[in-house]
Image: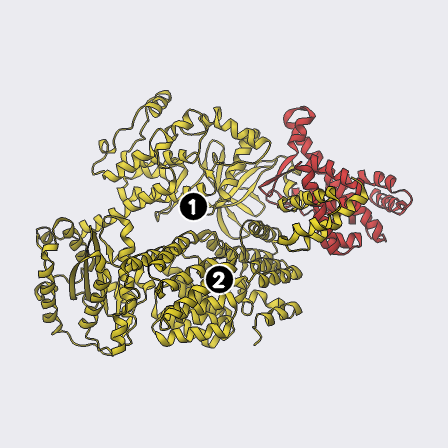
């Protein structure tokens, strides 16, 4: 058995166990997904060279295929997987941001690294990734589904419809939840 | 936060979002009536929702992707993404500039790459980003267009349009510019800066190196590297950078010779620093050196702060006093004493340029024999032949004479002599067959004051108006005739272009309370003067003078008029001279075709109406102005359409026989009320009243095209174009109507002709982009759409077309980005919802497209009149919601 196939079976097993202990499964799965996503991203971007736009959705689906393959996985487990992938994507972005800063500053103080993670989006508005991450954690405490919608949308790049399919809810519901979650996060971050 | 509490907040918030924004606050208050805490939380959330703009709407990774790439630099000859580097074309302090080919859109671009050394420094990257952001937020023909920017570990670069030309620095080195050329360049720089300042952006580094002059004289301002948003609200690093730039770094970054005193002193700078720097550039272009330059930098600083520049005349001969005054005013050390806005400087430069042009023509046209002429020669039989073919020369000679001679004394004598001259001449003239044709060329404003231009334009228009009422004469409409406002030197050629046999030319000068008007009738075949006369009248008699001129033209063309035609010829739309003047001022501004000018026009029309409440033409003008504001679509259209309707109604209530009134009203009912039958009735009446009314034919054709009666629309628009051949609007619309009739290739051919006619007119480019979309030539569609956007940044039609074409090319990100731009704009001003619908439709989001079309219907978006014929919506036609909309718009009848 190749190591890839072994990994795939391992993941599948973890996903099946999910119902029993979600927290545990998530913790086991995260590093696997994280590594694979990162590898896929690097490969993708090397191929494309600058000027690219990174298709996160494609990246995650590729990772999914790589890790789960053709095995039968029910929608709930798929949803779990994508939720984890979105979180992994978030970690990757934050880690890259911090790493880049350390390279430049030769390991300067951590609070400066946080500053570095503030990036310009759409050429207009800054989004503070670290603050967003913190606010998302707070949101997940009282509305886990909303937090995961935000992660899927913003970090995994899923469309409203894709999120609906993944979570088995209507697109209209996703849109509604997205609206209020986005508004809440925005108010938290600009507080 | 407690989960149950959050559910409660959400449910009120969700419900509130489904409600009309205007009623939202009342709803929320009612829903939270017994829970003030809840009220506050919902309101905070709603508030945040309103202000969130694009917050986290774009997936993170597409923005942050560059973070993930290992550090790499770009080299010459390299190929990356869809760019192929061709050669290096420049190098500056910050990096290199390459010429590259954009393989996707198959066009040349310039890529400016921030070099590694500099990329390592935060401030430089920030500055680099700022440059791109500043420049790309501006859309002006004299500002370099930014296509893309990349900031990341791999490379920082900006992709911009590639401009072939020399920097102004190179131009200075190699050639000696004439004053008029200096002014042409300065006017364009000032225009670019006006756009920047309008967007609260200061360039801060205006110098010859940052200006490129194309071989055709077109100027592009580059390098917004030091540019800074005046009202900067960015946070964090950006702010810190800005502050540092203002102080120590500012000195190093700017070029000392072109700095303003406040910049040199490290004080806070505002837009007036650009005015100063442009002054330095103009000074250098004339004098060959900058005003404060010295052998050492410290001395230059000292000069800049303490020493007044030498007058330009020290370095150059023939420097106009006005030019010296303008330059001195830009170079005032105290910014409060300078021009306060770039627009004022722009206006003064333009006026000077126009006067100079006038004088140049004057010089050119003076033949040696003429120079000795000290008396006014009336157009007698003897000198008619001498004047052959020198229309403009004569105009100018007369104007020049008027400057030096007290003409009033001669007036009476002149009129008699001219009349005698005519009769001798006309006796020899053979009558032409069929309908005679005539163009009244814009009268020259011979008054020193450029503000008197409305008078010269106004008298021309009034004469055209009166003469157009005659069935036996084909009179060139204003729009084509005014193409020759600047240059009337070649009468024969003008007549050929317009397809007329005779021309009326003239000039008008205001001297105190007197007007001196010269008018001439010219036979285009040989350029000979058929008739000429000078009128010296009190200003208050301008209306009478204008009637006299119209009558004289008719007499000298030997036209036989019916009684009713005679009445029409002599018809005065107002007896109040002041009201007429105000009306003409209104027209003058209206023809500038921008919303701000239109608003000025409105106020003049209103003043005219106050003086003469029965001034039907002024009401028609008012109706037109409100309608164009509504169609320009920067403001919600409903109010302006209603005002247009009211003014239009009033115009024909006062004067039912006013063709312009009916035609305008028909147009307002078309755009604003979707009352196809009502609109048609007014168009028909307008054409019955005046079959020569080219605009009425065009408007009627528009209605016919949009309701799908293509076989009637096309001959109608062709007729309008033939009547008004140089009016690019008619050609552009004919292209659109052909396209909507499914005759795409013919549409493109017509649009191509219109490009040639008016290279700076945006509409043909827009319609060409639509035509290319129909042909599936999406790259060409994008190019044309961008041209339209560049030429007319405030309209959103071409952004939609670009987004649509990008979608079809499979560039969903670009398409979405353009849609987002529209949505963002829609938060700031009115954007036709039907435009947003089309962008969604391009992206394949049918439901959203239909949602937005419904919104367009509710908001009475004027652009909904294209629902039936726009081929971009063909994929929606079988949707039940679309069918329902067609019904509601009465398109199914």
Q: Is residue B670 above or below residue B181?
A: below
* Label 1 secondary element: loop
Q: Is residue B762 above or below residue A21?
A: below
Q: Colour of chain A?
A: red
Q: Residue at x 81, y 45 (%)?
A: B4
Q: Quarter holding the C terminus of chain B?
A: bottom right
Q: Chain of mark 1?
A: B
| B322 over B390 or under it: above or below | above
Q: Alpha-carbon neighbours of circle 1 within 10 Å: few (<14), some, or many (≥20)?
A: some
Which one is nearer the viewer's eye here, B22 or B152?
A: B22
- The answer to whether A156 appears left or right of B249 in the picture is right
Do callouts 1 and 2 point to residues on the same chain? yes
x then y, percent, for residue A151: 74, 44
Q: In the rendered view, does A68 fall on the left or right side of B440?
A: right
Q: Which mark is residue B163?
A: 1
Q: Residue extending furthest right?
A: A20
Q: Which chain is yellow?
A: B
Residue B411: tell me if it is visible. yes
Residue at which label 2 appears: B641
Q: Residue at x 62, y 51 (%)?
A: B813
Please name whichever residue, B518 or B482, is drawn nearer the observer in this view of the structure.
B518
Describe the element under mark 2 as helix, strand or loop: helix
Dot 2 surroundings within 10 Å: few (below 14), some, or many (20 or more)?
many
Q: In this rendering, is residue B10 above or below B838?
A: above
Which of the two labelled residues, at mark 1 and mark 2, occupies the earlier sequence position?
1
Left or right for B375, reference A159: left
**Depth check, front residue: B465 or A174:** B465
Q: Position of residue B503 (x, y in %)?
A: 23, 66
């Amino acid at each position: 058995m190749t190591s890839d196939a072994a990994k795939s079976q391992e993941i599948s097993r973890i996903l099946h166990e999910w119902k029993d202990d979600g927290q545990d499964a998530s913790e086991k799965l995260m590093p696997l997904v994280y590594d694979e996503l990162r590898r896929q991203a690097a490969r993708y971007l090397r191929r494309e060279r600058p000027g690219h736009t990174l298709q996160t959705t494609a990246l995650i689906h590729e990772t999914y295929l790589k890790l789960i393959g053709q095995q039968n996985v029910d929608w709930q487990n798929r949803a779990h997987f994508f939720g984890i992938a979105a979180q992994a994507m978030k970690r990757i972005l934050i880690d890259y941001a911090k790493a880049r800063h350390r390279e430049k500053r030769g390991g300067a103080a951590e609070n400066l690294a946080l500053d570095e993670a503030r990036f310009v989006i759409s050429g207009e508005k800054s989004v503070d990734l670290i603050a967003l991450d913190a606010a998302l954690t707070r949101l997940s405490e009282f509305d886990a589904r909303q937090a995961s919608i935000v992660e899927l949308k913003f970090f995994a790049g899923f469309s409203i419809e894709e999120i609906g399919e993944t979570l088995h809810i209507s697109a209209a519901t996703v849109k509604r939840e997205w609206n209020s979650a986005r508004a809440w996060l925005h108010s938290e971050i600009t507080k | 936060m407690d989960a149950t509490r959050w559910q409660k907040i959400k449910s009120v918030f969700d419900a509130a979002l489904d409600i009309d924004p205007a009623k939202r606050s009342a709803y929320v208050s009612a829903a939270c009536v017994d829970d003030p805490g809840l009220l506050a939380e919902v309101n905070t959330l709603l508030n945040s929702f309103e202000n969130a703009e694009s917050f986290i709407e774009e997936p993170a990774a597409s923005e942050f992707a560059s973070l993930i790439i290992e550090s790499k630099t770009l080299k010459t000859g390299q190929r990356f993404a869809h760019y192929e580097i061709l050669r290096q074309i420049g190098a500056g302090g910050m990096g290199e500039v390459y010429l590259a080919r954009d393989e996707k859109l198959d066009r040349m671009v310039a890529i400016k790459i921030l070099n590694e050394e500099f990329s390592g420094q935060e401030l430089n990257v920030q500055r680099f980003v700022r440059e791109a952001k500043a420049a790309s937020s501006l859309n002006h023909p004299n500002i370099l267009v930014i296509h893309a920017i990349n900031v990341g570990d791999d490379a920082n670069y900006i992709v911009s349009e590639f401009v072939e030309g020399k920097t102004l620095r190179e131009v200075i080195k190699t050639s000696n510019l004439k004053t008029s050329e200096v002014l042409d360049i300065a006017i364009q720089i000032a225009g670019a800066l006006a756009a920047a300042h309008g967007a609260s952006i200061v360039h801060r580094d205006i110098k010859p190196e940052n200006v490129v002059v194309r071989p055709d004289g077109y100027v592009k301002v580059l390098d917004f590297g030091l540019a800074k948003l005046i009202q900067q609200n960015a946070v964090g690093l950006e702010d810190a950078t800005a502050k540092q730039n203002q102080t120590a770094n500012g000195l190093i970054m700017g070029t000392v010779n072109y700095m303003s005193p406040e910049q040199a002193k490290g004080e806070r700078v505002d837009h007036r620093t650009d005015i100063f720097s442009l002054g330095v550039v103009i000074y250098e272009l004339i004098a060959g050196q900058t005003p404060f330059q010295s052998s050492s930098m410290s001395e230059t600083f000292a000069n800049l702060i303490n020493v007044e520049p030498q007058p330009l005349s020290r370095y150059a001969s023939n420097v106009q006093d006005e030019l010296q005054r303008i330059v001195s005013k830009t170079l005032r050390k105290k910014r409060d004493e300078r021009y306060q806005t770039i627009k004022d400087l722009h206006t003064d430069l333009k006026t000077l340029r126009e006067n100079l042009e006038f004088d140049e023509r004057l010089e050119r046209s003076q033949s040696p024999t003429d120079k000795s002429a000290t008396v006014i020669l009336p157009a007698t039989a003897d000198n008619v032949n001498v004047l052959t073919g020198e229309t403009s020369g004569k105009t100018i000679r007369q104007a020049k004479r008027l400057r030096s001679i007290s003409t009033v004394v001669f007036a009476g004598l002149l009129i008699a002599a001219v009349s005698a001259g005519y009769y001798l001449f006309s006796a020899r003239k053979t009558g032409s067959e069929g309908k005679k044709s005539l163009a009244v060329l814009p009268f020259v404003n011979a008054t020193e004051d450029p503000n008197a231009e409305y008078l010269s334009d106004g008298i021309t228009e009034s004469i055209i108006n009166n003469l157009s009422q005659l069935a036996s004469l084909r009179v060139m409409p204003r729009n084509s005739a005014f193409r020759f406002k600047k240059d009337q030197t070649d009468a024969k050629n003008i007549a050929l272009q317009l397809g007329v046999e005779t021309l009326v030319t003239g000039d008008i000068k205001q001297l105190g309370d007197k007007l001196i008007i010269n008018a001439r009738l010219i036979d285009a075949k040989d350029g000979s003067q058929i008739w000429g006369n000078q009128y010296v009248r009190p200003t208050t008699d301008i209306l009478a003078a204008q009637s006299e001129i119209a009558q004289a033209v008719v007499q000298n063309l030997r036209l036989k008029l019916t009684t009713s035609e005679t009445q029409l010829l002599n018809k005065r739309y107002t007896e109040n001279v002041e009201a007429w003047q105000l009306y003409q001022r209104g027209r003058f501004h209206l023809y500038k075709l921008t919303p701000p000018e239109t608003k000025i026009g409105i106020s003049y029309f209103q003043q005219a109406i106050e003086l003469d409440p029965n001034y039907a033409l002024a009401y028609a003008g008012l109706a037109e102005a409100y309608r164009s504001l509504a169609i320009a679509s920067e403001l919600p259209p409903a109010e302006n359409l209603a005002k247009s309707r009211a003014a239009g109604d009033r115009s024909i209530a006062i004067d039912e026989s006013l063709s312009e009134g009916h035609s305008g009203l028909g147009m307002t009912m078309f755009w604003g009320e979707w009352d196809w039958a009502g609109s048609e009735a007014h168009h028909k009446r307008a054409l019955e009243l005046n079959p020569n009314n080219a605009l009425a034919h065009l408007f009627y054709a528009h209605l016919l095209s949009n309701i799908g009666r293509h076989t009637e629309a096309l001959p109608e628009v062709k007729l309008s174009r033939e009547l008004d051949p140089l009016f690019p609007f008619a050609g552009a619309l004919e292209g659109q109507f052909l396209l909507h009739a499914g005759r795409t290739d013919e549409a493109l051919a017509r649009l191509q002709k219109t490009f040639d006619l008016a290279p700076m007119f945006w509409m043909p480019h827009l319609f060409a982009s639509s035509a290319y979309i129909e042909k599936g030539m999406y790259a060409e569609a994008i190019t044309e759409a961008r041209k339209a956007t560049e030429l007319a940044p405030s309209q959103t039609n071409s952004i939609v077309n670009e987004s649509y074409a990008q979608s079809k090319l499979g560039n969903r990100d670009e398409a979405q980005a353009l849609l987002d731009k529209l949505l963002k704009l829609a938060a700031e001003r009115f954007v036709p919802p039907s435009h947003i619908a089309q962008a969604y439709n391009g992206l394949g989001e049918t439901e959203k497209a239909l949602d937005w079309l419904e919104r367009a219907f509710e908001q009475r978006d004027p652009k909904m009149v294209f629902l039936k014929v726009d081929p971009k919506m063909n994929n929606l036609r079988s949707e039940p919601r679309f069918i329902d909309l067609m019904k509601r718009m009465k398109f199914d009848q």
